[in-house]
Image (tube, grey):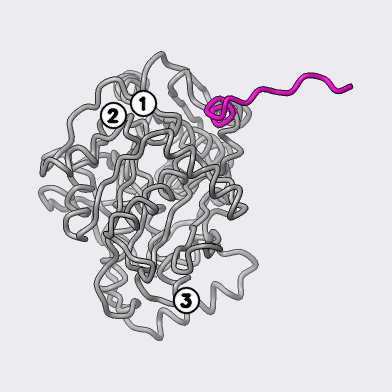
Amino acid sequence: MPEIKNLECSRCQATISAAMPQTLCPKCKGSLYVRYDLQPLHGIAARDAIAREAASCPWAGMWRYRSVLPDVRPVTLGEGWTPMLPSRRHPNAFLKDEGTNPTGSFKARGLALAVTMARHYGLRQLAIPSAGNAAGALAAYAAAAGIAAHIFMPRDVPFANYVEATAYGANVTLVDGLISDCGRIVAERSQTEGWFDISTLKEPFRVEGKKTMGYELVEQLGWEYPDAVFYPTGGGVGLIGMWKAFAELEELGWVKPGKRPRMIAVQSSGCAPVAKAFDEGATASEMWPNAATFASGLRVPKPYGDSIMLEILRESHGRAVAIPDAEILASLQDWAKNEGLFLSPEGAAATAAYGRLRASGFLTASDRVVLFNTGSALKYTDVIAEAMHLERPAGGE
């Protein structure tokens, strides 16, 4: 298991020691990547040995890839190795169901690693702004690690997010505003209260947890890349993490040769800063005014990693797609009725985007694609019911 070699800035490529906890690059405020010496793990034999060892464990989850993760004792609740479900109607489409993770979303991966490293470094107070699911994940893993969690969420998040974070014992504050407002408060309070801020891309280890999605989808497809990956994009850590995973897989020699998948960032048309910037050929996004969508995880008006995401989309010959809420809801209902899959609004944005890009000719029926459902729809029953104009029926006869 390789030790961390250093941290590297995504902007200026400065290298920094990982001996102490770090947030952003001290030179340019760029996000930091974790770098390892991967040479000892190079080759198919090493890859297959790791896969065999994982198969012998009762449940390795994302820690089956611990050889390419920091060498520390994990704080785990059973995250990772989520199902890759083939569509019943689209032979080459696969639904990667992250809703089966602990706390019901993909956020479990990044927060499991971030809290693991926080415990390793001896941090005792963690703070995060959240559009919903990151709150529950931090609260759960902090509780498992015996660390205090300070969470700031918009007041109108799905009620399940508030309930679970509170149940786990976190210090929860609801804010009249968006996640950007919550992020500003966390930054200010972290300075005065001595909290460690683990906001999206403002510490290096949430990316490490999310990169396991890239390793998983490649392994689950027989160590081959798909033609495209559809990823619901708010903060974009998963998109960035998977791209890092693909680079590591190639350095390791673990993936069959071939071009990387086209990365498709999916947003709601009610909050689409990355899609707008992509369409305009910009290198960074602008703050999205009056952000509004029932897909709360996509309601990020100015993601910190926008420049990195735009680079990835263009390098992969991918796209950024904005889907109206009505189209998201229609796809949610379609996949529930015809596939037996109750998707989160964010996941339904991905399936809607797949339909749109198939219709446009950007993709064909023969292209093998992975669609990410990033959370369990059961955490969104209040907002989905409102979107469907459903009310609890009156009493019986």
The crowd level at tag 2 (other Cα within 10 Å; few <14, some 14-19, many 20+) is many
| Circles 1, 2 touching at the beta carbon (< 8 Å) | yes
Task: Pick whichever of labels 1 and 2 is earlier in the sequence.
Answer: 1
Task: Note whether 44 is above or below 124 in the view shown.
Answer: below
Q: Residue at x 26, y 47 (%)?
A: 320
Q: What element carries label 1?
A: helix
Q: What stretch is highlighted in magenta?
A: 382-397
Reading the image, the residue beneath label 2 is 301
Q: Is residue 391 magenta?
A: yes
In the displayed structure, does residue 374 sit left or right of residue 15? right
Q: In this view, does 296 lie to the left or right of 306?
A: right
Task: Measure how far apart labels 2 and 3 are at the Cα level.
Answer: 40 Å
- Disc assigned to residue 50: 3
Give the residue type at disc 1. Answer: Ile
Nearer to us in this view, 397 or 304: 397
Residue 182, given in percent of the width and then of the height, sits at 36, 22
